[in-house]
Image: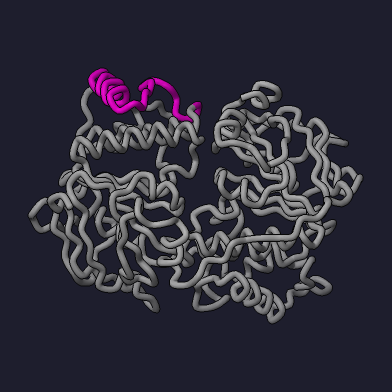
């Protein structure tokens, strides 16, 4: 082990009703890529917030480069050499790259000097950026480059990365890994958080595993299987989703040249999308974030209306129907943004269960709400999907991201949909929770539901899909059988190559 850069000694942090971190201790060596692993609610987020100065520990201490480290706020952490790239980008679409980077600096240089430094640093680390491009016009991978370069301009000793590959193509992941390895070779330490365990095995030198707020083990990822790491995280044997092969049934959902304008200025309009999904089939749709996924889900949910004949459910045109009318028919959707779109943050889980389940679960009668029945429905979802919460009266915003994800997906699955369309169903959830959600999707398909899964997790799509396609700039690639597709072929499809060009790679 190289000399220690950061020592975590007995860190403890408690909130009302839960101990987020309980006497956690571990070390990150200089020039080490160290993974922090754990299922949702294990305490990873609280721990990195303490390292970055967002949260103050109740007990314990940190030592950075041989000196006591007590960051009162993120600006102090940055001054002492700790930088962080968050899972959700904090960028302003209307500003250019240099303006966004300047906002994240304590004392930014003059604009011309900063632009020069951005070009110099971005090219040095294989992440080329034009400092004058508007961020709203950038791909998800380019936006992540902005966040990373902003950190690199601070010359950090420790770089914290939270789920950094969740919005990248396989080719962009390779570029990122080359950058991180170059940083490691130059002596920068990296604390890496990801649910993608094969990535951990490829990149990380060591790993610390948390479970229910406590450190439960360490491992050398290159010498440990992904399954073994997942089972250390959950403390039990990991379930592998499965279903029996069965011929698909009749067409349930058909899109015929679906074209709609994006409601957002920086969104992506859909251009002539044609597809069919049959009963009992799972159609997987890949794509880097910002290529029309949100617009497609909106056009299927009824939040974005379309011209007559473009969207058909069981042969009936539904493009002019709103969300509740489509739900009555059995066309249900689960959007990517769980807090604010899939769930109302300040409403309880019972109220959130009522929002989409009122009609299909019989939670209303003659205009009156059946609160007891709504609470029972919420409790069913909590129990079946192992949602870690004190009870259904808790506000949605009080749940961790992964637990809220389990709740909003479970809420839709348990309404007996005829067609289910979900965007990023396992976004930010641990291996065990992801397996639960994927098994629920496969069980629906086995029961005759037609399912569309929109996801940036290629492993997920290959595991559960019967057929596969990719969205790029609002267009859909050819739809192909999922079995036998290679990562290179998938990457090309996500990058905009279509038809025979991909087929003969």
The x and y percentages for residue 224 are 38, 57
The residue lying at 22 percent from left, 66 percent from top is 25
User: Furthest residue to the left?
Assistant: 66
| Looking at the image, residue 369 lies above or below residue 426 | below
- Verify whether residue 311 appears in magenta: no
| Looking at the image, residue 266 lies above or below residue 226 | above
User: Furthest residue to the bottom?
Assistant: 372
Res 206 quadrant in image: bottom left
The x and y percentages for residue 101 are 32, 32
**Which quadrant of the rendered structure holds the C terminus?**
top right
The x and y percentages for residue 248 are 83, 50
Can the viewer see residue 125 in this picture? yes
Q: Is the magenta stretch mostly helix, strand or loop?
A: helix
The image's colouring method is one colour
The x and y percentages for residue 468 are 68, 40
User: Furthest residue to the right?
Assistant: 315
Can the viewer see residue 331 in this picture? no
Left-right relation of 215 to 135: left
């Amino acid at each position: 082990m190289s000399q220690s850069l950061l020592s975590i000694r007995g860190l403890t942090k408690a909130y009302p009703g839960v101990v987020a971190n309980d006497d956690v201790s571990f070390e990150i060596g200089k020039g080490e890529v160290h993974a922090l692993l754990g299922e949702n609610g294990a305490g990873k987020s609280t721990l990195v917030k303490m390292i970055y100065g967002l949260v103050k520990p109740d007990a314990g201490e940190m030592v950075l480069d041989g000196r006591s480290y007590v960051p009162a706020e993120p600006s102090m952490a940055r001054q002492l050499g700790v930088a962080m790239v968050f899972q959700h980008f904090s960028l302003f679409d209307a500003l250019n790259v240099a303006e966004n980077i300047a906002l994240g600096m304590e004392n930014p240089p003059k604009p011309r000097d900063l632009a020069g430094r951005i070009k110099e640093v971005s090219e040095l680390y294989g992440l080329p950026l034009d400092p004058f491009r508007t961020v709203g016009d950038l791909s998800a991978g380019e936006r992540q480059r902005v966040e990373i370069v902003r950190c690199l301009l601070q010359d950090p000793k420790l770089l914290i990365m939270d789920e950094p590959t969740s919005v990248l193509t396989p080719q962009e992941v390779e570029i990122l890994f080359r950058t991180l390895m170059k940083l490691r070779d130059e002596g920068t330490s990296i604390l890496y958080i990801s649910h993608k365990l094969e990535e951990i095995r490829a990149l990380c030198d060591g790993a610390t595993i948390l479970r229910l707020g406590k450190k439960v083990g360490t491992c050398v990822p290159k010498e440990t299987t992904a399954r073994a790491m997942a089972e250390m995280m959950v403390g039990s044997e990991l379930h592998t989703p499965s279903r029996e092969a069965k011929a698909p049934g009749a067409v349930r959902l058909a899109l015929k040249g679906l074209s709609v304008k994006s409601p957002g200025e920086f969104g992506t309009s859909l251009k002539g999308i044609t597809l069919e999904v049959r009963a009992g089939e799972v159609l997987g749709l890949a794509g880097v974030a910002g290529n029309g996924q949100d617009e497609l889900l909106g056009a299927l949910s009824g939040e974005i209306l379309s011209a007559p004949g473009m969207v058909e459910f069981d042969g009936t045109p539904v493009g002019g129907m709103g969300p509740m009318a489509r739900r009555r028919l059995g066309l249900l959707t689960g959007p990517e943004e769980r807090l604010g779109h899939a769930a109302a943050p300040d409403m309880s889980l019972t109220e959130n269960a009522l929002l989409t389940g009122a009609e299909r679960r019989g939670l209303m009668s003659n205009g009156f709400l059946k609160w007891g029945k709504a609470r029972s429905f919420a409790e069913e979802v909590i129990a079946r999907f192992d949602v870690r919460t004190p009870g259904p009266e808790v506000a949605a915003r009080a749940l961790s991201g992964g637990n809220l994800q389990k709740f909003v997906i479970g809420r839709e699955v348990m309404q007996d949909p005829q067609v289910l369309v979900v965007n990023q169903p396992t976004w930010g959830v641990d291996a065990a929770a992801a397996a639960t959600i994927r098994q629920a999707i496969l069980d629906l398909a086995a029961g005759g539901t037609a399912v569309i899964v929109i996801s940036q997790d290629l492993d997920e799509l290959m595991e559960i899909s019967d057929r596969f396609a990719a969205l790029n700039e609002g267009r859909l690639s050819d739809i192909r059988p999922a079995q036998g597709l290679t990562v290179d072929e998938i990457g090309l499809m996500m990058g905009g190559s279509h038809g025979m060009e991909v087929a003969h790679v």
